[in-house]
Amino acid sequence: MPTFEITLDDTSPMIRYSSDWRPGSSVRDILADRYSEKTFTMCQVDGDSFQLEFFGTVVGVFGAHRPNHGAYQALLDGIPATTNNGSSGTDAFMQSLYNGFATLGVHNLTFTNQESRFLDVDYITFETSVGQDDEELIVNTYQDNHPAFVYTPDSSWSKSTDKLSWLSGSSAHATSDPSATAKFTFQGKYNGHPPNGYLCPSGAAFTVMMDNGSVTAYNASQQFFKPKEILYYAGNLGKGNHTLQIQINSSTNGTDSQQLVIDYAEVYTSASLGGSFLSSASFHNLNVTAHSGQNSSTSLIAGLAIISALAISSTLVCMYLIWRLRRENKDLNAKLRGLPPVSISSITPFTEPPTTSRNDYYTTHNTSSRGVLSSGRAFALNLSRYVPQSKRNVANSSGRPVSQRRESQIEPPQYTEGL
């Protein structure tokens, strides 16, 4: 069956810390940025603990091994594991502190400090599964403005916060009214989902109720701002329709300083559970499908219009280039017709110069003082065998081998520079 991993940062409301745990800070620890997402939660009191309830199989706790850390113990479903120690000669971060294994189901993990030394938590992971073997995992994301969310009363929910740029889709719903509720309803045979929001110092305590069941309390208040945080996770929901209701805890004073912010929700499912990807599913709100189809038609029309415009532009450019080429050809022909005819009598026939023997050539041209380089070495200007590039093929036009022509005839130099 499709298996996936859920990662809870140390700040997740799903992790329930005892009273003496506190968030780590770069003010007290210069190595705070070595932790995942630069956050960690720590304690220093013997007996301090945290608890996590999850639906899954494998669970892992990650933190740091440091010189000032001590012993701790993990209990999975009340069964103690061996005591481990986080003390280390050097600082090591994002280390595995504990791994637990169990059958697929609901489990409870308790983690306890065994000394009056430091123990910190960086993040926790657990694996869970849905559906049957050899199936594809289907994950659908519902933004806060999706029709699956219903906010009541609408006047108590704001769509504007000062952190929108940090949130998924740059949108969110926020409220400070304890009587306001948000219901997330999804149809089909789904297995689990986590709604997400953000945590901050002004985060409110809230309650969650699944399918009109028991109410569970959580807290979104944290020392630092944390976007896209998992506020709640439920698994093994079974087939059928499910509704999650979330609202500010009634014991919280309704002030603007305490807010509950909902960003998006994710649903994990598979085909055997009746699930399908959101883009291909016909949701209960028909306006969503109609609006999506209208956008697709608009995109198609826009695409065809752009392609047609490019084709017309290319045709016009080609026509202009052809017209210009023809015009230039006509102008060139007109100029050629206007030139005066060439007189044959003005052409002087070429006559081959008289043959000169090698000895006569040497005796006729003596090296003068101009044939002395500045270095003092003399050179014969008149012995140049240079033949212009245009004449090199003519020099061997007789068809006889070059060696025979050199014995019988030596052509005169084409340039007599020493005369």
Image (cartoon, rainbow, N blue to C red):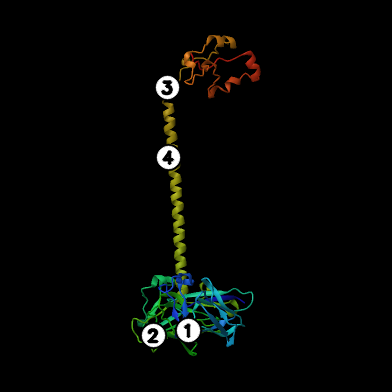
> Would residue 16 be seen by someone viewing this image from the given angle?
yes
Mark 3 to mark 1 CA distance (whole Å): 112 Å
How far from the left and from the top, in percent, is residue 173? 40, 78
**Residue 180 tag number:** 2
Q: Which residue is identified by label 1?
A: 45
Look at the numbered disc 1 and give the secondary structure of its residue.
Answer: loop
Local secondary structure at mark 4: helix
**Discs 2/1, front:** 1
Q: Which mark is nearer the camera, 3 or 2?
A: 2
| Residue 129: percent from left, percent from top | 59, 78
Residue type pointed to by label 3: Pro
Disc number placed over residue 340 in the picture, else none: 3
For the residue marked with disc 1, what is the amino acid? Val
Q: x, y (%) of residue 356?
A: 57, 10
Q: Are marks 3 and 2 in contact (CB under 8 Å)?
A: no
Q: Which residue is mark 4?
A: 324
